[in-house]
Image (cartoon, rainbow, N blue to C red):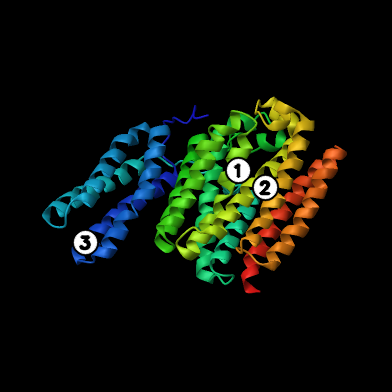
Amino acid sequence: MTEGLRTTDAPGGWLRACAIAVAAAALLAVASGASGADSVHRVVAALAAPPLAALLVAALLSHRKLVAPVAATGALLVAAALAPPGPAHLGLAVPALAAASALAAATCRGGHVPAGSWRDYVTLTKPRIMVLLLLTGACGAAVGADGRPSAALLTTTLVGLGLACGGASALNHVLDRDIDRLMGPRTAARPVAAGRITAPRALEFGLALSAASFTLLAAEANVLTAVLALVGNLFYVVVYTGYLKRRGPQNIVLGGAAGAVPPLVGYAAATGSVAAPALWLFVIVCLWTPPHFWALALLLKEHYAKAEVPMLPVVAGETETRRRILGYTAILVAASVVPFATGTFGPLYLAAALVLGGLFLLLAWSLRRAPSRRGAAAVFHYSLLYLALLFVAAALDPLL
């Protein structure tokens, strides 16, 4: 999956932007330190960490010539941060700034690198999937804000979460480019699989978006929010895409945790913590994921089989998959009622959980009794509506 990432091409614009951001943060840190604004100085200095981390990953995987300057810059920045205020700190801050400037120069060295079509970069972020993730994140923020999130809170949450989701999706394109070529014309036409954007360039894009997400959420919301978004990003890319997806039919059951992180991010942005309402939203998405994706897998069984991806219909057969869809849907509907029973959510949420859940169960039962592609498509498409409306009900519930 990581083969073919090594390149002799010059770093692209996204990686160069990261290097410039590190140098700018180092420069502002030195300037703020000289002015005596200690609190501002520490915050500005910390802003160098996310883009530097993106540079390090890109250097290790694609641009080996940058490993030494990235490591040197990182070591000097850490040493300066750990040094006590005074001559020692200043003595390390100046060479750290010099190293960051040299890193930016090294990253920007080389000729013009074709960026590719902006439409392809939008495609890398998987915007259709992102819409539902942003909705659950916004609803998580609304629940945390008792139904009245501010415009500033929603903007920070949606932009930061969107950057994290887009970065993770771009990295997913990189890791899955081999199986995308085998899973039919839809995935074979994706930018990296089709060769319109090279894997190293998509890697740089994904890393840059991920770094920007952490920086924005840490600076404008709180560190917990930024960490949760990063954890969701890493779980989706490293754990699910990099390991679980190709290991066995439980990939979706375990990997669903990645898609369940956005409501935690939204709630943490609103409250600075993670409490029972956010955890229930997390659990609901985790339980929703298997029937949702298994219904899709029924429709794409031949594609998954051709790509040798061990989705449940390929490994256990369609009959067993339909049985598990019904079983997980029943568990989901039962679990969705518990937050009302514990006093976490109120009557509006309960009504939505019962009505929406009842229809979900009916569709899953119909698919079990009368198997068809049309039935599988109905379960898949309705599951999207189910989650969206249930989360909207949870967000509006505190207003009653």
Q: Choose top left, top right, bottom left or bottom right for residue 57.
A: top left
Up-down relation of residue 289 to residue 357 (above or below): above
Residue 154 in the figure: left or right of residue 207: right
Asked whether disc 2 touches disc 1, contact meaning CB atoms under 8 Å apart, the reply is yes
Asked whether disc 3 touches disc 1, contact meaning CB atoms under 8 Å apart, the reply is no
Q: Which mark is residue 122?
A: none
Q: Is residue 84 visible?
A: yes
Q: Choose top left, top right, bottom left or bottom right for residue 179.
A: top right
Identify residue for label 3: 33
Q: Position of residue 325 (x, y in %)?
A: 74, 40
Specify the amino acid type for callout 2: Trp
Q: Residues within 10 Å of mark 3 (few under 14, many from 20)?
A: many
> Could you tell me which residue is drawn at 28 percent across and 43 percent down?
74
Identify residue for label 1: 256
Q: Position of residue 233 (x, y in %)?
A: 50, 45
Identify residue for label 2: 288
Circle count: 3
> Could you tell me which residue is drawn at 70 percent across and 67 percent down?
348
Mark whose residue sits in front, 3 or 1: 1
